[in-house]
Image: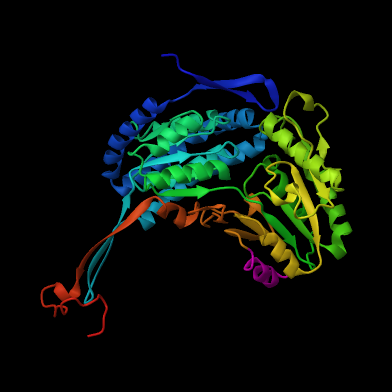
């Protein structure tokens, strides 16, 4: 039988082939699940301290590989090299973070009192299917891998066909010191993902990606009663309160929170809300910051801060959104600079754009752009800004910017978002110990933090009620637990 393969081209130089991966069909996926089940039984019986040690050893093995992994990721995704180096390093650190948190949280907890004897155990699910996207493939895979492994699970990763190489190399290094079959990769598109999610040997599904694919995966998992954790899209608002007093560093941070990875980040700023009375001043400051920090160029150029978008289809969609806004009377402002030696015709480049004069109903505002285009909208009252920010079906992230931290927190508490930043946004506001995830149609479950670890265990109880232990008084027939007697 001839194996089908998927080629990946460099989004910055589309005549360059980064590589090709063989597509894993249903039979290959089924075989991977069988191997994972056998490896998981061995791994789950390994003492927790030894599992933690293996994760720390994997992190140490990765250190000398990080530059190569970063360059490979830059070539396949179009993300600039500095971005990919940061991602590779942070992803590696998550292995140690979850090794530590697993040792702290996962041991059995036993209590013995007059109320009874109770043991709480944290048992692994079994085989985890991790379906991951292209835009931050290293972090978004390890956020599933590390907590799942320390908890005693096996993991089968199905990476995006747009970014299989960097994460494939990272996972190969991690797998070297683990039981064979415990960490595996299956490559392909929708057919491969379907075969994995629908396999009865898969015990939980973890997915990060778009809402369309997320809905399909949730439906498949739901039919099999397979639990899932989903992190889907966001249309994140950033509200600058009337008292916001941003210095250059703050404006620079806000601009990068919008345009890092060419805006192709689920928690990037997607809508800017500024007070109408200060709109001209704030637009000027935003444009000036963009000129300071945005340099469009080849991802391997050490001085570039943003590269191309991931595909021709993505670029075409973004251009349609921009032209639609222009046709409705919006003003389009080009941002940043272009590297002198950049050949923008060689790849899927799009100059960063600020769009003013849009209405909330326009597609550029109402949908997630997922690219280097952002609308700036004005408001007359904070209540109005909150109502407009909460409009729509998505609720992943948001931010509030103010000189008064208490005022910012009060507004943040009113926003329908799983994670609200104060005086920052996007990566600069994240930390490994803080849970991240969405509300509304931005998904369910959490990554990061202790909550991200507990997604991969089932808490099971062993209980001897005090009433039925030697010397206990017993309960009246048919009495409810805790009922007064």
Residue 70: x %, y % from top left: 59, 33
Residue 401 visible in the displayed image: no
Q: Quadrant of residue 90?
A: top right
Q: How many marks?
A: 0
Residue 407 inside the magenta-drawn segment = yes
Q: Is residue 38 left or right of residue 57?
A: left
Q: Is residue 374 left or right of residue 105?
A: right
Q: Which residue is drawn at the image coordinates 66% and 71% (left, top)? A: 410
Of the pair 6 and 245, the residue shown nearer to us? 6
Q: Main secondary structure of the magenta part?
A: helix
Q: Is residue 392 above or below residue 352?
A: below
Q: Is residue 310 left or right of residue 168?
A: right
Farthest residue toward the bottom?
485
In magenta, the rendered stretch is: 404-415
Residue 413: x %, y % from top left: 62, 68
Farthest residue toward the left?
470
Q: Is residue 85 left or right of residue 336?
A: left
Residue 88: x %, y % from top left: 56, 38
Q: Which residue is drawn at the image coordinates 67% and 59% (left, top)? A: 391
Q: Which residue is drawn at the image coordinates 65% and 66% (left, top)? A: 412
């Amino acid at each position: 039988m001839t194996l089908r393969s998927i080629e990946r081209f460099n989004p910055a130089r589309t005549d360059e082939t980064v590589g090709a991966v063989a597509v894993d069909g249903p039979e290959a996926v089924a075989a991977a699940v069988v191997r994972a089940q056998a490896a998981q039984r061995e791994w789950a019986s390994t003492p927790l301290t030894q599992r933690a040690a293996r994760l720390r050893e994997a992190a140490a093995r990765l250190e000398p590989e990080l530059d190569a992994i970063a360059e490979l990721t830059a070539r396949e995704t179009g993300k600039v090299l500095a971005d990919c180096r940061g991602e590779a390093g942070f992803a590696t650190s998550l292995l140690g973070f979850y090794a530590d948190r697993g040792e702290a949280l996962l041991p059995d907890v036993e209590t013995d009192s007059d109320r009874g004897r109770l043991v709480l155990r944290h048992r692994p699910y079994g085989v985890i299917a991790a379906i991951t996207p292209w835009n931050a493939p290293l972090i978004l895979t390890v956020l599933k891998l590390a907590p799942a492994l320390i908890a005693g699970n096996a993991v089968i990763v199905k990476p995006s066909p747009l970014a299989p190489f960097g994460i494939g190399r990272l996972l190969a290094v991690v797998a070297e010191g683990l039981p064979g079959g415990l960490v595996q990769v299956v490559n392909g598109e929708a057919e491969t993902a379907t075969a994995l999610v629908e396999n009865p040997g898969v015990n939980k599904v973890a997915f990060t990606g778009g809402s369309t694919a997320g809905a399909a995966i949730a439906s498949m998992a739901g039919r099999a009663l397979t639990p899932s954790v989903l992190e889907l899209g966001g249309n994140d608002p950033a509200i600058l309160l009337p008292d916001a007093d941003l210095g250059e560093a703050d404006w620079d941070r806000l601009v990068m929170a919008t345009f890092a990875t060419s805006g192709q980040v689920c928690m990037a700023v997607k809508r800017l809300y500024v007070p109408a009375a200060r709109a001209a001043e704030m637009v000027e400051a935003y444009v000036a910051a963009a000129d300071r920090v945005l340099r469009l160029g080849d991802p391997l150029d050490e001085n570039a801060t943003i590269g191309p978008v991931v595909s021709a289809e993505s670029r075409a969609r973004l251009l349609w959104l921009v032209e639609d806004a222009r046709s409705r009377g919006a003003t389009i402002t080009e941002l940043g600079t272009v590297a002198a030696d950049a050949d923008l015709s060689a790849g899927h480049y799009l100059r960063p754009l600020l769009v003013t004069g849009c209405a909330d109903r326009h597609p550029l505002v109402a949908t997630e752009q997922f690219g280097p285009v952002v609308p700036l909208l004005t408001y007359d009252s904070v209540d109005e800004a909150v109502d407009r920010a909460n409009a729509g079906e998505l609720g992943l992230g948001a931010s509030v910017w103010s000189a008064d931290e208490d005022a910012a927190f009060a507004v943040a508490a009113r926003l329908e978002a799983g994670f609200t930043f104060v005086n920052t946004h996007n990566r600069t506001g994240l930390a490994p110990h803080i849970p991240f995830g969405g509300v509304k149609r931005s998904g369910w479950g959490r990554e990061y933090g202790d909550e991200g670890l507990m997604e991969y265990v089932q808490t099971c109880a062993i209980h001897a009620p005090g009433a039925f232990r030697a010397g206990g008084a017993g309960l009246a027939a048919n009495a409810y637990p805790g009922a007064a007697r």
